[in-house]
Amino acid sequence: MARNTSVMKSPLTEGYSSSRQGSRLWKRILSHYQLYLLLLPCIVFFIIFSYIPMAGLVLAFKEYQFNKGIFGSPWIGLTYFEMFFQDPQSLKLIQNTLVISGMKVFLAMPFPILLAIMFNEVRNSKLRNIFQGIVYLPHFFSWVIVVGMMQRILAPDTGLVNQVIEWFGGDGSKFFLMEESAFHPIMFWSYVWKDIGWNSIIYYAAIVGINPALYEAAKIDGANKWRQMWHITLPGIRSTIIVLFILSLGNILSAGFDQIYLLKTPGNMNVSEILDTYIIYMGLESGQFGFGTAIGMMQGIVGLILVLTVNKVAKKWFQSSLW
Amino acid sequence: MIGGTVMKKTTVSLGATFGRLMTALNYGLIILLCLSIILPTLNILALSLNVGSDAAKGGIYLWPRIFTLDNFKEVFKQSNIVNAFFISIFRTVLGTLLSVILTAMAAYALKSKTMPGQKQLTFFVFFTMLFSGGLIPYYILLKELHLTNSIWVYIIPALYSVWNMMIMRSFFDQTPEGLEEAARIDGCSDLGIFFRIILPTSKPVIATISLFNAVGHWNDWFTGSFYVRDQGMKPLSTVLQEMLTKQQALTDTLMSSTGAIQMQMLDKIQVTGTSLKMATIIIVVTPIVIVYPFLQKYFAKGVMIGSMKE
């Protein structure tokens, strides 16, 4: 009952002193104590596993010493950042990261949208369910499995792809995973292949949600399929596209660790070494914690700024945003 | 007049042919995509069921040439793989159970519109999706908490996921207000409503999130690879990942000058590294493929509901 006090606000009680209002707030908090109880472990969890590591970012400005811990270690200012930007290899890392994530964010984006539109054109719902079931499946395979399969299928001589090439009279001895020139196509198409179905779900839901009367009206006006797609379907899912696009921008400096780490070979290092794999290598494997933290921090901040900016722009121009 | 009708007829039939062509193209492309998923998987299955030394000669496509179960027997003879299998099951079952119930509890609390601080608390949780401290501070934290090299590193840091929480919250938001109100008038507390009304009416989203969680646990190789040193504590996915990396080292040496001799050696052994690897991939994939059809009807719905903005 106590939770209704705010609803019963009458002109008489409105001018009361702040202490009275404070006690009312206190009452409302008390009346919800069970909800706070449900939420408590969650808040504690995020303080420990998300916010404390954020505080740990000070490590980017310190020389980490195991016996002194994060807060006891001496300050060294911007040394790591200078180190990073003076190393010519860093430019290569940033370039590799941006090329890979750029391909994933921009080039791969139309595929799931297209697939959703294609699914919508399959009128037989039983058949569509089967198709969708198959196409969603690779999303549930981890990159370990997918790369394991690719290692075999793309293997020289005995791999499926090379055997087919040989069958057509080509050179079937190519070691694709070791070749620098094959890295980008392999990375891109395996990424599209793995998540095209999954990412199409949301678009498909948005398309199904479009008012059918719009299509009817368009048909009467003589609009063909293409025009319907262009003038009804695409505008109908515009806000979905924008929201997903904003979210994906946050990852522009992390090109998808699992896939790249597992696809990285001595042969394609030159294009496959990205910031994330470098952090693992420098931080975890070589123990340069401060340096690794500094690179991670730059990634995080750039991602955050991008998401906030694009969100603002999208809100202004398209009236769609994350919040 | 007559010419006009003829003209119109031809354009209509042309349009119809075009439409049929487009439908055929549509089906064709979708089937092609499905084949690109089914055929490689069958190829791996065939390789895992073929005698390893024979498969090394090539020519295996969609079914085994010399059928054998030796590869699977050999995998299960390796004590570390059997052990890893049980670790994977342990973390998948316990991790999923704990995570789903805790996430549902938090999602329900955050859905309340009357709770003071609801907006701030939601932002507090949501913000962790936009920004994080990065890998190294996180690793140091796990070390300080003595979670590295412990079996709990698989369970505790994975208890909550913001994304899953948002999906659940949107779903809970759709429970009819009247249902909750009626229960409240009957003297039901918030906890009572959660357990007696929200949970029982939210089976699709619970199933969806459980599936996401379970698959996430089953597939996670990163934690075992970088936060756990003890070989006896690594889950199946990590073991497979280490096999792949080692396998690559092996093929590297095969590529070098001693290649010919190594190839001859491979011919003598029936079970090869590759055939073991194929069998392990099939073992990792099988539980997912088995559970998948039962949950498929739920998860598409779950994702759709989660994606709708209030």
Image (spheres, helix red, strand yellow):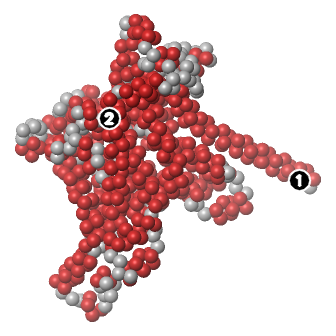
Relative to A160, residue B220 above or below? below
Residue at (58% x, 58% y) in the render? A208
Q: Secondary structure at mark 2?
A: helix
In the rendered image, which residue does mark 2 sit on?
B83
Q: Is residue B12 visible?
A: yes
Relative to B48, residue B122 above or below? below
Residue at (54% x, 54% y) in the render? B297
Q: Which residue is more in the foreground, B256 or B96? A: B96
Q: Answer few, some or many: residues within 10 Å of disc 1's Cα (few below 14, many 20 plus, some between 14 and 19).
A: few
Task: Identify the disc placed on residue A307.
Answer: none
Q: Chain of mark 1?
A: B
Q: Which residue is more in the foreground, B264 or B139? A: B264
The spot of residue A282 in percent (x, y) is: 22, 31
Q: Distance from label 2 to label 1 (Cα)?
A: 77 Å
In the rendered image, which residue does mark 1 sit on?
B5
Q: Answer few, some or many: residues within 10 Å of disc 2's Cα (few below 14, many 20 plus, some between 14 and 19).
A: some
Relative to A278, residue A44 above or below? below
Q: Which residue is more in the foreground, B278 or A102? A: B278
Q: Amino acid at mark 2?
A: Asn
- The answer to whether A291 appears left or right of B246 in the picture is left
Residue at (71% x, 59% y) in the render? A219
Q: Secondary structure at mark 1?
A: helix
The spot of residue A201 in percent (x, y) is: 52, 51
Marks 2 and 1, the one that precedes in the sequence: 1
